[in-house]
Amino acid sequence: MDNKSNHPSMNPINDSVLSRESWKIFQIMAEFVEGFERMAYVKPSVSIFGSARTAPEHPYYKLTVDIARELSDAGFSVVSGGGPGIMEAANKGAFEGKSPSIGLNIQLPHEQIGNPYQDISLSFKHFFSRKVMFVKYASAYVVMPGGFGTLDELAEILTLVQTKKSRRIPIILVHQPFWEGLLGWFKTTMVNEGVINKEDLDLIKIISDPKKITNAIFEHYENCGFEPSAEEAEILLQL
């Protein structure tokens, strides 16, 4: 048997490294506290996701502006990642509407430049604390075409709702031609392999018309209201 005593994980950690790691906790706590304090009163809200690479002249950009403005005029605050592309389009549409436009900006090695259409702007160093803010206060998710980050956010909310770690909210994908390959794989591979249930696909709707998106969200809450029940509030508290 190999002697494990020489393995690095068995040796005491360097004090300076431990000190930096320990103090990092307070930075993380500060991000959560500020996020909770600023976001708790931003409701009802809709989180919109999509590619940072989408140019202003692209049809997806204009469609996102229209969706965000429709939601804003209907009384929903709109939350995006605060950066360029679809994030900017979402903030712009909300900024032009009647309700607040919120940007949850992330600090990256190649600095993300915040867009100018934010009534409320928060800055995060950690993706995980930022993702909690997207989920915790959202009444719905609207997911535009995007890359890995967009897929990450989609998978996050699907997992949380599927496992009942978050309340069930509308999850709306926009532009069917972009998503149909992924949804087809969900149906023909993931369901057939038994790694998800067929009913899990009911969590997702595909809608592209801004007015129909707003109506679908209102229909979801018609009988329960936007405020979470006592049970749902407890679930969100433990998120």
Image: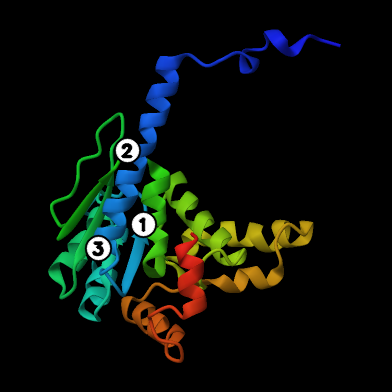
Can you give x and y, in whole percent of width and height, for residue 37 in the image?
A: 26, 59
Q: Residues within 10 Å of mark 2 (few under 14, many from 20)?
A: some
Kindly identify which numbered label has been placed on residue 176: none
Position of 9 relative to 210 (above/below):
above
- Pointer 3 or 1: first along the chain: 3
**Can you see residue 1?**
yes
- Name the residue beneath numbered marker 1: 133
Estimate the spatial distance between the alpha carbons at disc 3 and disc 2, rounded to whole Å: 37 Å
Q: Residue at x 30, y 52 (%)?
A: 33
Q: Secondary structure at mark 2?
A: helix
Callout 3 amino acid = Lys
- Name the residue beneath numbered marker 3: 62
Give yes or no for contact between labels 1 and 2 (Cβ–Cβ under 8 Å).
no
Give yes or no for contact between labels 3 and 2 (Cβ–Cβ under 8 Å).
no
Residue furthest toward the bottom?
A: 223
Horizontal arrangement in the rendering, residue 45 relative to residue 17 (left or right): left
Q: Quadrant of residue 63?
A: bottom left
Q: Residue at x 36, y 57 (%)?
A: 133
Callout 2 amino acid = Gln
- Pointer 1 or 2: first along the chain: 2
Q: Residue at x 24, y 33 (%)?
A: 111
Position of 33 relative to 106 (above/below):
below
**Can you see residue 169?**
no
Callout 1 amino acid = Met
Position of 123 relative to 216 (above/below):
above
Give yes or no for contact between labels 3 and 1 (Cβ–Cβ under 8 Å).
no
**Along the line of sight, which residue is nearer the eye, 126 or 185?**
126
Estimate the spatial distance between the alpha carbons at disc 1 and disc 2, rounded to whole Å: 16 Å
**Along the line of sight, which residue is nearer the eye, 184 or 124?**
124
- Name the residue beneath numbered marker 2: 27
Can you give x and y, in whole percent of width and height, for residue 112 in the image?
A: 25, 39
